[in-house]
Each structure stands twice: as C-alpha cells, then as structure tokens.
Amino acid sequence: MVETLDTRVDIKTKGISGRRTANVEVKSLAGVKADSLQRVNTGINEFNRVLGGGFVPGQVVLLAGEPGVGKSTLVTQICKKLVSSKILYVCGEENPGQLKLRALRMNYDGANLFTTSEADVSAIEQIMYSNTGKTKFDFLIVDSIQTLYTPELMSSIGSVAQIRECTQRIVRFSKSMNICTILIGHITKEGEIAGPKVLEHVVDTVLYMEGDNQHLYRILRTTKNRFGAVSEVGIFEMTEDGIREVENPSSMFISNLPGDLIGSSVAVAMEGFRALTYEVQALAVRTSFGYPKRTSIGFNVNRLQVLLAVSEKKCNIPCSQFDIYLNIAGGFKVSDPALDLAVCVSVASAVLAKPVMSKSCFFGEVGLLGEIRTVPHAIKREKESTRLGYKPQSNVKTLKDAIGKYLVN
C-alpha cells in the first residue's frame, strides 16, 4: 500500500532581502492525477505521426531546417487542413502578399488564416488577447522566431538575448491560454538550430525538416517530444501546388530496374520506429593514383572506409585498387548501422563485376572481424521487405558468406 502524503509545510528562508514565509504543498506521486491528452488532428497523417498523434493544447513546436526545404509550405498546408480553427500567422521574413501567393498556389483561400508583419512580441500578445481576456485565435505561427524582438532589451534583433526572451514569453503565453504554437527556426551552417540552446529546452517539441532541394522528398524528424515518442519521422513530397504526404515511402525510394544489377542492393533501415527500404548504389573505377578515392553521398564516409577495410581483409575484395563511389538513391542521409551489409554487398558487386541476386534485401551491422551482428527491430524490417516483394537475407553469419551467397557468378 502506497501512503499518500498531503501536507502543507511552512517554510522560512533567509535571503538577500530578508525573511519570507511561504506555504508549499507536498504530494506523493501516487496521489497525482495524470492529465488526459486531447489531441488536435492536423489533417496530415505524417505530421500527426511525428507529433505523437496530433497537437496538444498549449504545445509549442519548434520547426527547423535548411533554407528552401519547405518549412513555410508545410505550415501553410497545416493551416489549410485546420479549416475550423482561427490561426494567426506572424510574417517576420515575408510580407502577407507573399504568403497569399503561396496559399493560392496551394488552392487555399485562407479564410481561417490571419496575418501580421508585427515583430514586437508584446504587440503580438495584445493581438492574441480579446477584450474579455481570452484568446482570439486557436493557433499561432511565427515565421521565424529569429525575427521577433522585445524593446525591453537593447540588443539587436536575432541576438541570443532577444531569441531567449521572446521564446520564453511566447511559451508562457501559449501555456496559459492553451494555444498551439509553431515556431519556425533558422539553422547554422553546421546544421544546428541557430540561437541559444535554451531555445530547444523550453519548447515541447523539436522537429527537423531534411532533404535535398534538388530532390522531391523531405523527411520530418522528431528529436524532442514531451507528448510522444522521439526519433519518429514523416515523409513528404514537394509538388508544384505545395507539399503532400507520402503514404508508401519505401516503394518511392527504390528504382524499378529489372533483373540483376551490378553495384546495387536494397537495404532496410529504421527511421525512428518506422522501417524504410533504400537503394544502395556503388561504383568502382580502377584508380589511377597511389591513394584510392572514396566518395559517399548519404552515408558516412568514415564508416565506408572501415567497411572497405573489412571487405578487403576478411573477404579478399581488392578495394584498394579501385576508387569507390557510394550513393543512397533519393538524396537521403541514412545513419542506421544496419545499412552496413548492403553497402558491403554493393561494393563487392561493383568491384567484382558480379550482379546482386534480384529481389534480395539486406540489413545487418558488419563488425571488424567480418561478422554480421544482429540489429534491432528485425521483425519490422522483414515484414517491410516482404511486403514490397523482397526476400531478406537469412542463414548468413559472416560477410564472406553473404557475398558468396548473394552475388551471381
């Protein structure tokens, strides 16, 4: 039996200003009631996935990504779906006319969307409040948080002090009024969110939007979520009339080339709790220099160097005689260690000029001793590959066995 402690403690403290007395209520966790979350459906299943099921009233979401990746397009699409909600869009980087052009391109009349170019956070709070003390809007979108300022600070717009103060004020306001808020943030050239680290601490959810501007697909990742699982991903496709969710992303990342291919294999990687298939392509060209070149797109080049050394040492693949070029088709970056086996098979196929057995699918981490190590979520990976008509590798314990079994002589 858990004892519930519910007392009021009289606390006396001495500080710089003297003595003060406060009443503090102490409760056992067993006696605390858990709040039931009432989610707000955004109308976009992929966005609901990364949020953990939809918006929670009072939730503050920080959305960051490269310039031009589609952050503003995505939030405009959300506004289009939330037709029954009144939304205030703070245009800090563009004027309302530019927002209107984007909405027209998406066939969105914007009847539920209200815009302002005001950058003073105090004025934004006044706009949100009605004469009755309640909020006039259900959602707040700030594009971007780096453009807001408060005249109470003397520092320039975009400084660390301004970003920290404006973010904290918006978070307090959103929590007190139960308003769902999306803050669009800049990133640095290193790929991190620009501004103080406290920016990520004070918000409830942090989302990163990734993708090459030259490709159609975008990945939305969750790195922090107080109301759901982290490391979830959503897949989107950029089109002429906006952005749309991809319901079956695995089939979009694999080419439909027929027959056995040299230097190409299919891998199953986990993006959060989601199994996705990728095409791993390798090209081997006999080197003209003393030091062979290694180039990788979408895969860590240092990891590629290690896998090439293991392939040469344990499987007698003459990688040192070739320049190796590796590519994850579709322009995505994959960091799952389970991609190791597919990378090694593709490289071996390219170097030996032997095609990979058709409809084969690979996942597994390759160790320095040439062994194939088990990876998490094996059942999910097998189901995803089987659903797409591929046969996952089986009964292979070493890299040498896998290459000998799945390369066509």
Image: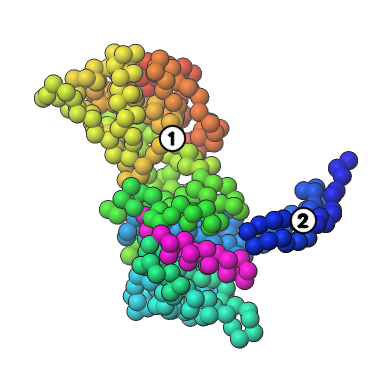
Is 178 included in the stretch rendered in magenta?
A: yes
The residue nearer to you, when weighing 219 against 8, is: 8
**Against 74, is 405 above or below?**
above
The residue positioned 47% from the left and 42% from the top of the image is 271
For the rendered model, the colour scheme is rainbow
**Against 190, is 245 above or below?**
below
Residue sitting at the far bottom: 131
Amino acid on which the number 2 mark rests in the picture: Ile
Specify the quadrant that holds the C terminus: top left
Specify the quadrant that holds the N terminus: top right
Horizontal relation, residue 295 to residue 163: left or right:
left
Image coordinates of residue 28 in percent, x first then y, are 80, 48
What residue would you read off at disc 1? 336
Q: Residues within 10 Å of mark 2 (few under 14, many from 20)?
A: few
User: Going from the N terminus, do you reach mark 1 or mark 2 first?
Assistant: 2
What residue would you read off at disc 2? 11
Residue sitting at the far left: 288
Amino acid on which the number 1 mark rests in the picture: Asp
The residue positioned 51% from the left and 80% from the top of the image is 127
Image coordinates of residue 143 in percent, x first then y, are 41, 67
The residue positioned 24% from the left and 34% from the top of the image is 295
Horizontal relation, residue 321 to residue 330: left or right:
left
Residue 91 location, quadrant: bottom left
- The answer to whether residue 344 is visible is yes
Image coordinates of residue 184 in percent, x first then y, are 43, 62
The magenta region covers: 160-187
Q: CA distance from mark 1 to mark 2?
A: 52 Å
The residue nearer to you, when weighing 261 against 224, is: 224
The residue nearer to you, when weighing 303 against 284, is: 303
Image coordinates of residue 2 in percent, x first then y, are 86, 42
